[in-house]
Image (cartoon, grey):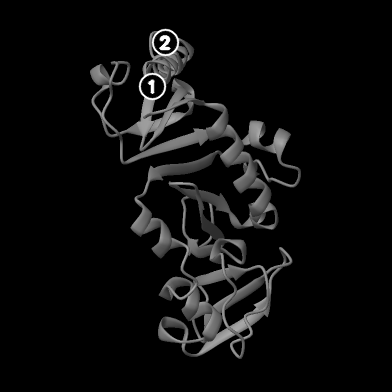
Amino acid sequence: MMKTRWLHMVMLTALSLAAGSCGLSPKEVRVVLGKHELCIPVENLRSHELPAWLKSATGLPPSKAILLIVGAEEVARHVEGYVPYYGDIPDNLLFSVESVDEKSRRWLLNPEMRVYSDAWYGRGLLDNRVVEPHASGFYKVRQAGIYSFWDALKIYPDSTQPAPTDPHSWFLAGCWGVTTASTEPGTQVNCLSKFVHEDLLFHVYLNEESLAVVEDVRAFVLQRVLSWKVADRV
């Protein structure tokens, strides 16, 4: 019993030393998401729910969600096919990460959840759906007569078959047309892609022009967050 307790204390000390410098520099911030303790460069942290004076404090309570950003040119160096500019505007990669409990995790991974099943079976908000090929190589699923909102699916949604498990492997994004000062109405299309890793939910925002590499963008985002991880909280 004494030996087990001693080993536990040694492990905690080692983790504390590994994360000890995080947050002491103005260039990095310590963030806790559920069991994950992260040391994030300030340049990548777009927002945080805690006040600034608490960001580098020790013993932080778990945060619910953080919004992060990575420069478009950096993403393009790591993800072949990522389009770093929309016209003359850098298409910087925005994504959020939040901690979810086990009940929420199971719900998010349930292929019968309406956001997935409506697109797959053609029901609910997509009861009169149109399925058409998209330039990305995926399938575009929209309601008949509606062009501004649609879903991107990796495989053809055969409603005669059950929806595949792990919905994030085939339901790749929800997309919508937007109007900006530099574009014609509806000509810019943004997409939101979600996925779950362990107890973390990711929301990744990207332009339609980069939709073809959305799975690589997801992998890049996950790798980047894991590279900032310094400890698992006990």
Residue 166, quarter of the rendered image: bottom right
Q: Position of residue 73 (x, y in %)?
A: 66, 33
Compared across the picture, whether 220 is left or right of 54 comes to: right
Q: Is residue 178 visible?
A: yes
Total numbered labels placed on residues in the image? 2
Q: Quadrant of the C terminus?
A: top left
Categorize mark 1 by other alpha carbons within 10 Å: few (<14), some (14-19), many (20+): many
Kindly identify which residue carries mark 2.
20
- Give left or right: position of 48 versus 187: left
> Is residue 186 among what the camera can see?
no
State the SS at label 1: strand
Q: Amino acid at mark 1?
A: Arg
Q: Position of residue 122 (x, y in %)?
A: 51, 86
Q: Secondary structure at mark 2?
A: loop
Q: Is residue 112 above or below residue 102?
A: below
At x 72%, y 66%, the residue is 135
Residue 124 is situated, as x and y percent measured from the top left of the image, at: 41, 85
Mark 2, other Cα within 10 Å: few <14 / some 14–19 / many ≥20: some
Nearer-the-camera pick, 157 or 99: 99
Between residue 193 and residue 2, name the one nearer to us. Answer: 2
Q: Residue at x 46, y 76 (%)?
A: 112
Q: Is residue 70 above or below residue 158?
A: above
Three-letter amino acid code at disc 2?
A: Gly
Q: Which residue is mark 1?
A: 30
Q: Nearer the viewer, mark 2 or mark 1?
A: 2
Q: Position of residue 219 (x, y in %)?
A: 63, 44
Q: Is residue 9 above or below residue 64?
A: above
* As drawn, 152 above or below 212: below
